Image (cartoon, rainbow, N blue to C red):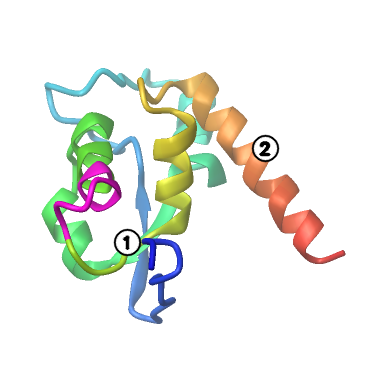
Amino acid sequence: MGIIENYVFKRNRIIEHIAPQTPQSNSLMKWEDTDEDKTICDSFGNLVMISLGLNSTLSNESYEVKTAHVRSYCNGSKSGSIESLKLLVVHKDHPSGWTKDSIKEHGEKMYKWLQESFR
């Protein structure tokens, strides 16, 4: 079975920013102190549900570190199921980086998927 087939939704999830609100110095993503950046940072496109344990592990890590974590499931070096299908989609769609534009693009894609799933 693949990582998607092994996914089990668990209720002990919290909402985490993909690009953190307070990025570490090694992060390529930098937020300006503007209303637009605050809106993008807290938008649906930049949020995922993960476990408390993973949140503690990844906390304010950069997108690059978070996507490396997802890659470890994709290449089989970590066993078990991936914690967030949305984070998997982000990794597949944006392997080279996470920008303000990709956050907006991802958010629009997720909204469309949700709308289609209710039809």
Q: Residue at x 40, y 81 (%)?
A: 11
- Ranked by sequence position, the earlier of labels 1 and 2 is 1
Q: Which mark is residue 13?
A: none
Image quadrant holding the C terminus, namely bottom right
Q: Nearer the viewer, residue 80 or 103?
A: 80
The residue tagged 1 is 82
* Magenta stretch in the rendered image: 71-78
Q: Nearer the viewer, mark 1 or mark 2?
A: 1
Report if residue 6 is visible in the image. yes
Please report contact status of discs 1 and 2: CB closer than 8 Å, yes or no: no
Taking the image as shown, residue 91 lies to the left or right of residue 60, namely right
Q: Residue at x 17, y 39 (%)?
A: 61
**Res. 81 image quadrant:** bottom left
Q: Residues within 10 Å of mark 1 (few under 14, many from 20)?
A: many
Report if residue 35 is visible in the image. no
Picture coordinates of residue 26, whole percent (x, y)? 13, 22
- Distance of label 1 from label 2 (alpha carbons): 23 Å
Q: Nearer the viewer, residue 118 or 15?
A: 118
Picture coordinates of residue 50, whole percent (x, y)? 33, 63
The residue tagged 2 is 108
In the displayed structure, 114 sits above or below 31; it is: below
Callout 2: helix, strand or loop?
helix
Image quadrant holding the N terminus, namely bottom left
Amino acid type at circle 1 is Ile
In the displayed structure, 16 sits above or below 5; it is: above
Taking the image as shown, residue 36 lies to the left or right of residue 11, namely right
Q: Residue furthest right?
A: 119
Q: Residue at x 41, y 77 (%)?
A: 8
Q: Residue at x 42, y 54 (%)?
A: 48
Amino acid type at circle 2 is Glu
